[in-house]
Image: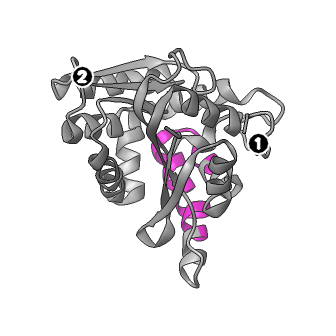
Amino acid sequence: MTQESAPRVVETIKPYDAEGDKKPQIAGMFDNIAKRYDLLNRILSMGIDKTWRKRVVKMMRPHEPKHILDVATGTADLALDLAKQLKPDHVRGLDISPKMLEFGREKVKKADLDPIITLEVGDSENMPYEDNTFDAVTVSFGVRNFQNLNAGLSEMYRVLRPGGQLIVLEFSEPTGFPLKQLFHFYFKYILPTIGRITSKDKRAYTYLYESVQAFPSGQKFADVLSSLDFKSVTCTPFTIGICSAYSAYKPS
């Protein structure tokens, strides 16, 4: 199914200006919080994000991908884990925020992985790569920020080689009482308060809660992937459903 004929998923949540274009707002927001992004991630997730990334790597290990694309790579946490643990020939990290990539490059250099990891500024909905280029494509906590979700997913499909694996790691929400209520309270009140004090950006972590609420998680997102011709789509909840890993394949 083509992007045009796929079910339309409209993402209206924007960080700052409801009437403005989403892409520059996302780039500006992440530029604003880049300096403290890693610290805030560790604090706000209580370090669990490291475990989530390890589980993503484990899901990819049987396929031994040699050429990997990490979309919305940010400060390259997942790209670094992929390079260290899967030993691929090359990992490319793409992100719309130049400042996030600056900090990512520092981490890559410190890890002596410059020959393996390349980080570059780019638009996930219009990638500068040839068709059928990568053995695997990953995106962690980035698809919520796409201006056009179908367009971004279609681009990932395009650049995957036939038989290649897509893994999307994204926030979801627990369904049972009282975990669902605690999740909402933390994301709506605690997390934005800590984020505002630490990052000095009043909207960034309020936007996080709003974008998580608007995202079609679980079976809804799995259905979006299937509608775009991905096959063998699975959804695996992590940590009582706080986030989920979606695995899908481009047909051979």
Does 214 appear above or below 100? below
Dot 1 or dot 2, earlier in sequence: 1
Q: Is residue 174 magenta?
A: no
Residue 65: give x, y in percent of width and height.
31, 36
Residue 221: give x, y in percent of width and height.
64, 54
List the residue tagged with mark 1.
6
Q: Amino acid at mark 2?
A: Ile
Few, some or many residues within 10 Å of mark 1 (<14, 14–19, 20+): some
Along the line of sight, which residue is nearer the eye, 45 or 197? Answer: 45
**How far apart, in angstroms, are the residues tagged by discs 1 and 2?**
35 Å
Q: Is residue 81 left or right of residue 190?
A: left
Residue 113: give x, y in percent of width and height.
20, 24
- Residue at 76% x, 26% y: name it: 21
Can the viewer see residue 228?
Answer: yes
Q: Is residue 199 magenta?
A: yes
In the image, the segment drawn in magenta is 184-207
Q: Amino acid at mark 1?
A: Ala
- Residue at 40% x, 48% y: name it: 41
Q: Nearer the viewer, mark 1 or mark 2?
A: 1
List the residue tagged with mark 2.
116
